[in-house]
Amino acid sequence: MSPAGETFPRPRVAIAEPVNHDRVSAILAGKQIFDDGAGAEADLSFGRSPEDFQHGNRYQLCLIPQESSREWLGALVRLNCNYFIESFDQIDLRDLGPIRTAQRGAKWDLLVCMSTQSAYQLPMARKFVTALRHRGIIHDTIAPTVEMAVQEAFANSLVHGNLELDTTGHLTMDRFNALGEETARRLEAPAYGGRVIMLTAKKRRNGNVEISINDQGNGFTPPPEKPAPKLPGSESTFGRGLPLIRSLCQNVSFERGGRTIKLTFTPDTKASMPLNSNFAAGVEEAEKAIGESDLRNPRDATILIADDAMISREIIASYLRSDGFTNLVFAKDGEDALEQVRKHNPDLIILDIIMPKMDGYAVCKALRADPAYAETPIIAQTALEENEGRTRIFEDGATDLILKPLNKAELIARTRIHLENRLLVKQLQAYQERTQSELELARDMQEMLIPKPEQYRGIGLDYGMTISASFQMSSELGGDMWGLAPIDKDRLGVYIVDFAGHGLGAALNTFRLHSLIWSEEDRGEDPGTYLEALNRHLKGLLPVGQYATMLYGVIDRAKETFRYASAACTSPVLGNIKTGSTVFLDGSGVPLGVIRDAQYETRELTFTTDNFLLLYSDALIETVLDDGVFLEDDRLLKMVHNIVTETNGSTDLASNLADQFMDRAPVKLHDDFTVVSLQSADISGPKAS
């Protein structure tokens, strides 16, 4: 009964089996879901898969079993239902319920309510956004953007909200392991793992889509949007992804004391696609052109008719001309056929098997032996009745076989099919060759951005340093780059960049950033300010979702310092040639191109003639070696220490490290590999023990 006294039909509820029926009864009997008590009289339907429920039925609610939640996430897409709730013993919606009444019309276009324990193990953001796409709530063009924002907000609410985990500080391997153990303990504890996390989505009349993520933690005070957000300190564990979320949404707001994050997306957020949209559109147009160009109009193709009987040649020609084929070439025997093929390079050959001088079998063999004609379609024609002859012509290379006397409709149909296939293959080959040529050009251009040995060695001598480097492009076109920027007689700038992704998009972004690096002035004043300027320019050039990690630093030989700023770069290694000691520097920071007004800290440390600096791309630490593990953390430091010790402070540290890495890495790297070392040229290193 509604407040106005209007009576509504019993709600229809889908029960996903296997499920605890007593638990279902208890949930429906309460008022957390149906605040008017209508759940106790709900019309229940049971099924073991989404297909067990009639799509024509509209369900107000689907209860998902805790035991098999992963399998039932597909129901979000395939079941005609707006509300999905996990059925588990500790369910307590508290101020999140009631979430549904018996009134007509759902409050939410989609609602998913899960326990923390289950949600932590499931790809919730991906499934939720997929369901929104299939329901027409969001368009495919903004789906990647929405998923990225929802994933960040969902992770914050799950980890920092319901689990109340503190993830601030430097994440060492020991801390990472301890954090994993604590996470497992809290997931098993009802006080944390039994809390509810809820995602809701609603499309408004103005076309905007509102998505909220609701947790049951203790809440938080969100960092202010202005001034420009920085990475949070120990005062708040929330917010590592908040600047990214804000950059992806039209608006972000907080309710319920910070326990609800509300995201608003506009329907025209096409610029937020995490792709190089211009390149993607170009490829799409090229593929479209290939798919439409002449494939249904092959009449301009050159057709060779090879037959020793003139009457047969004329009959075949008349059939073809009647269907619009006019570019016909003729051959009176096998030898003449080969001559005409070399002269006209036909798109299709109609070949008689029994001919003087050279029969059709020999012609087929000769053509297939020549790479230039190995793919040319050949329709053999024969009056032979025995199967042996027909089988042999295919073995010798014929594409198809048609029997004499020829049937006009059959001849034309087979001619069309083979010409369409031929033209399609030729155009795809041309497109592939053009694309490969463009990729090779981009690869050559990218390699031109990398300093040559004679260049960086010469610059090193100018500063009394030895500079060593190794760069290997991956099997895919990547986005790595490094370089040197001489400032004055004492100061030398050095940078290393890694763009996310592969292919032409990553390469084009590398070219953009390289131009910005050399167009920006004041490279030597303050590395943090310099990165901020680069980031502002890059943010305006990149679609949302594309970004770069970068480190820029200045070695001052007179002051014996190294001042640097990092945008989420791999942690540099600082070492001592004489002692062989090594330590990681802080590489944290906001990636370039994510937040327009991001700020970057300038860090300063002592860099004497005893020190060396090692910069590297993430391929060094994210490639699985032959023993099945990564070269990271203490293992990397130990390898560097051993190289310094065993080579007595070799001035070719980067090359030595690259050699050891390549010995144990796969032949084909999936990411660009870069390693650079800088040290004084007149150092006598430690003696090998």
Image (cartoon, grey):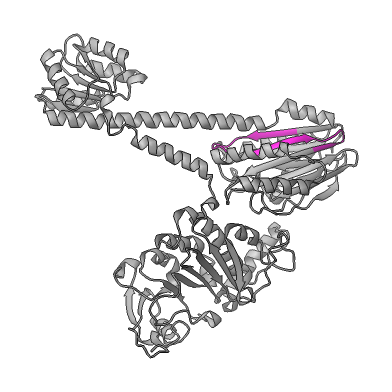
| Residue in the image at 47% along x and 79% along y | 99
Along the horizontal axis of the image, is 173 left or right of 326? Answer: right
Q: Residue furthest right?
A: 558
Nearer to the camera, 452 or 283: 283
| In this view, 320 is above or below 9 | above
Was residue 473 drawn as part of the magenta stretch in this picture? yes
Where is residue 183? Give x, y as percent: 61, 68
| In this view, 88 is above or below 452 | below
Nearer to the camera, 71 or 102: 102
Number of labelled discs? 0
Where is residue 615? Give x, y as percent: 73, 42
The C terminus: image quadrant: top right
Q: Residue furthest bottom?
A: 5
| In this view, 681 is above or below 689 | above
The N terminus: image quadrant: bottom left
Residue 550 appearing in the image? yes
| Residue in the image at 84% along x and 48% along y | 605
| Residue in the image at 34% along x and 84% along y | 8
| In this view, 156 is above or below 99 | above
Residue 641 appearing in the image? no
Along the horizontal axis of the image, is 672 left or right of 97? Answer: right
Question: Quarter of the image holding residue 260?
Answer: bottom right
Where is residue 248? Give x, y as percent: 58, 57
Q: Which residues are magenta?
A: 468-492
Question: Quarter of the image holding residue 15?
Answer: bottom left
